[in-house]
Image: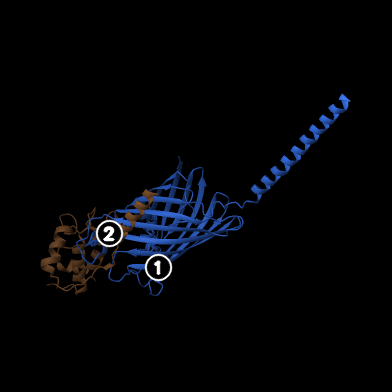
Amino acid sequence: MRFLIFVTMVRNRVLLFGLTLIVSATFAQEDFSDVMEEPEFIENVFSGTRVINGHSTETLEKNELEFRIEHRFGDMLPNWDASNLAQSWLGFDQAADIRFGFEYGITDNIMIGIGRSKGSGAPYRSLLDGFAKYRILRQKSEGMPISLTALGTVGFSYMKASDDLSQVSSFPNWQHRFGYSAQLNVSRKFGSWLSLSLSPTLVHRNYVAADDKNTLFALGGAARFSITKKMGVIIEYFHAFRGEPIHFFDRNNPNTFRNSLGIAFEFETFGHNFTINLTNSKGFGDVQYIPYTFSDWMNGEFRLGFSIGRKFSF
Amino acid sequence: MRNSLLFCGLLLIFLMISCKKDMAPEPTCVEEISFSEKVQPMIELNCSTSGCHDVAAQGGVNLVSYIGVEANADKILNVIQLEDGNSDLMPIGGPRLPDSTIQQFNCWIQQGKLNN
């Protein structure tokens, strides 16, 4: 009798243990399925927070600090004059503009930055800039096809005021030293090798020359072609709508505004992002390169430039 | 939360007081620029100094007289308009001449490079 009771107890406990295992395994499987089904964020739609001159839809991660150095040299072959090959070493002897900046991720989707640039002198020098960027949407493998950011920037020149009152750098009021921009940036990565972005941008400058507009709408577009996981080629173009004929390839108007066009090669190493570019614009920041690009690719007025970003995590 | 609201409020106030929509006046050449009173003193002070564009005629440019200045006026304007730091900027080594002086020289050219 006692033996039968013992056998029954053992049988019940084995059954209970077996049932527990099955139930646990079932729930565990369900949990695992949940993880598998969660759509993943698409990483590196663009590999840095910048494309060439403009911003990308990427933001720094929370508590990540990036130190950026950006440089633009002089015109490579102005008027296709071959003597520049030796005389200015394809523009290396000149520095159109230089910028140092610190940028910080407040959250994974909000970042801010400040910078100081030399200024191209056309028309400003000694510039400070700041921006805030918010990633509203982030592309996922399923359910969210795009990334979307909103960007606000401000630029301020503290250069010595010109004594020629017809110059925009004469700054009759302190407010005339400011310019602003607001931008929406939408991007999508197609597969593993192509990323596209579109950037409607509004630029407002408090003080402009008599032949210019205070508020200007521009539409930017960029494409990134991945060569490997860490290397890519980028093309970026910003078209400023001034209500005038397009002067982009107009050789007969040497002093008219041009639109910014750049092509770049970028690569990443651990913690670094490098971009080597050719562009016809000189200045940094939306309030500089969108309204104040005067150089013409068709006249050999493009320059070599580079951007280096070094990230630190806290 | 309170700090965020305070920051947003301050930012809004800043944007309201720092936003303007002004235009610089068009560059005009109303007054007639006298060569002897305005252009020649500027050239003597900055260009035809000893060993430069005087009889030494650096770069083949002699600016001691009206004839030399008139013949090279466009070339002079091009090089004095360059930015500080440009290796072709004149006066050589900078600093760049004041914008008002450059504009005055530009006006003299536009008015026909008069020997007045």
Q: Secondary structure at mark 2?
A: helix
- Residue A99 lies, with reference to residue A221, above or below; the image says above
Chain letter behind tag 1:
A
Chain letter behind tag 2:
A
Q: Is residue B28 left or right of residue A120?
A: left
Q: Is residue A265 left or right of residue A159?
A: right
Residue density around tag 2, few if under 14, some if 14–19, many if 20 or more, within 10 Å: many
Q: Colour of chain B?
A: brown
Residue at left offset 42%, top offset 70%: A249
- Residue A116 lies, with reference to residue A243, above or below; the image says above
Looking at the rendered structure, the kind of residue marked 1 is Phe
Using the image as rendered, state which of residue A250 and residue A233 is in the foreground.
A233
**Which quadrant, please, contains the C terminus of chain B?**
bottom left
Letter of the chain shown blue in the rendering: A
Q: Earlier in the sequence, mark 1 or mark 2?
A: 2
Using the image as rendered, state which of residue B28 and residue A179 is in the foreground.
A179
- Which residue is under mark 1? A217
Residue at left offset 45%, top offset 56%: A55
- Distance from disc 1 to disc 2, alpha carbons, whole Å, reads 20 Å
Looking at the rendered structure, the kind of residue marked 2 is Arg
How far from the left and from the top, in percent, is residue A37?
Answer: 65, 51
How far from the left and from the top, in percent, is residue A88?
Answer: 36, 54
Seen from this angle, which residue lies furthest top? A2
How far from the left and from the top, in percent, is residue A287?
Answer: 36, 60
- Which residue is under mark 2? A177
Locate residue A164: give its quadrant: bottom left
